[in-house]
Image (tube, rainbow, N blue to C red):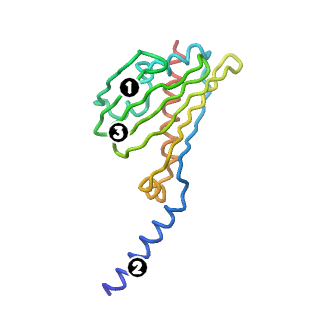
Amino acid sequence: MLKWFGIVAFLCLAFVLGLAANRPSTIHIARSARIGAPPERVYPLIADLHAFNRWNPWAKMDPATELEYRGPSEGVGAVSAWESDEVGSGSMEITQTREPEWVAIRLDFVEPFAATNEASFTLKAVDGATEVLWEMKGPASFPQRVIGVFVDMDAMMGETFDDGLAALRRIAESG
């Protein structure tokens, strides 16, 4: 009986690892929202990392998150680092901007998984409002692909992006 259990467990493990090996080696999460404010009002809430952390959904998950800022207060070279028992640790640095249309950010995660991803925010004026597209791209490590067999990462991360965009909307529209 124990022998059959071992064989079944091995086959299940091999199946999960096989599924993980065939998952994409990159991630791409994208969400968008329409904000009832012009890009000139929305852009500073992204390009200034102090303002960014007012609506950042991950900073809100753990009010005890320790934040550190380095470099300029906004724009290229601005850095925000975080340390949290709930959301891990890492840093983000603004690497490119095109005011008031676009902000690119390098994300360096330390915990719970080491990874480097690229995020961007594209802002487009549409009928007196701003269409904001938030994207994140990067490599998917093998452990992340194993987790992805059981958890829909796009849905999980996308929900957090949606929460962040809703918070950004509330702040931008309140003026």
Which residue in the protein does label 3 denote?
A: 87
Residue 31, compared with residue 93, is above or below; it is: below
Which residue in the protein does label 1 denote?
A: 80
Q: Are marks 2 and 3 in contact (CB under 8 Å)?
A: no
Q: Residue at x 38, y 75 (%)?
A: 9
Which residue in the protein does label 2 denote?
A: 8
Q: Amino acid at mark 2?
A: Val
Give me the C-alpha separation between circle 1 and circle 3.
15 Å
Q: What is the x, y in percent for residue 23?
A: 54, 58
Q: Amino acid at mark 3?
A: Val
Mark 1 Cα shell of 10 Å, populated few (<14), some (14-19), many (≥20): many
Residue extending farthest right: 127
Q: Residue at x 44, y 56 (%)?
A: 142
Earlier-in-chain disc, 1 versus 3: 1
Q: What is the x, y in percent for residue 130?
A: 63, 21
Q: Which mark is residue 131?
A: none
- Mark 1: which secondary structure? strand
